Image (cartoon, grey):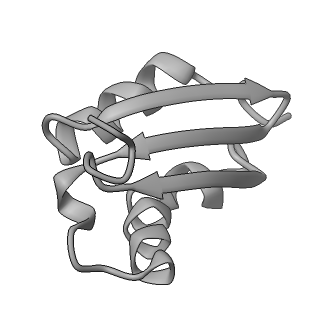
Amino acid sequence: MVNPMDEQAIESLLQERLPGCRLELTSEGNKLSLKIASEEFEGLNRVKRQQIIYALLDEKIKSGEIHAVSMVTQTPEEAGD
């Protein structure tokens, strides 16, 4: 039995590792959708940005808590902040 997704824990993890980020998070079953704006993404292409997020979520993905992730990664400027 796979643990249900803990949205609050995921949100806390991302906000701790990407201080000041703006985050929209939704989940359905073990599928996670993220929209995240962070200064950490400045100067990085889409793949590098996604690699950062996958690295942060690695344990939860390996455990099966998260099966699929869809994400939009932006700098604050790209997000209109």
- Tell me the residue at 68%/40% (across/down): 33
Residue 1, given in percent of the width and then of the height, sits at 86, 34
Eyeballing the image, is 56 above or below 16?
A: below
Q: Is residue 80 left or right of residue 26?
A: left
User: Left or right: 80 with respect to 50?
Assistant: left
Q: On screen, 27 above or below 77?
A: above
Q: Nearer the viewer, residue 45 or 28?
A: 45
Residue at the spot 26% in from the left edge and 50% down from the top edge: 77
Residue 29, percent from left and from top: 85, 29
Q: Is residue 15 left or right of residue 53?
A: left
Which residue in the rendered view is the most extreme toward the front?
A: 80
- Picture coordinates of residue 48 (x, y %)? 40, 81
Residue at the spot 46% in from the left edge and 32% down from the top edge = 10
In this figure, what is the number of numbered marks?
A: 0
Residue sitting farthest toward the top: 8
The residue positioned 50% from the left and 81% from the top of the image is: 47
Q: Is residue 64 left or right of residue 63?
A: right
Q: Nearer the viewer, residue 54 or 58?
A: 54
Picture quarter with the C terminus: top left
* Residue 41 location (% of width, % of height): 27, 65
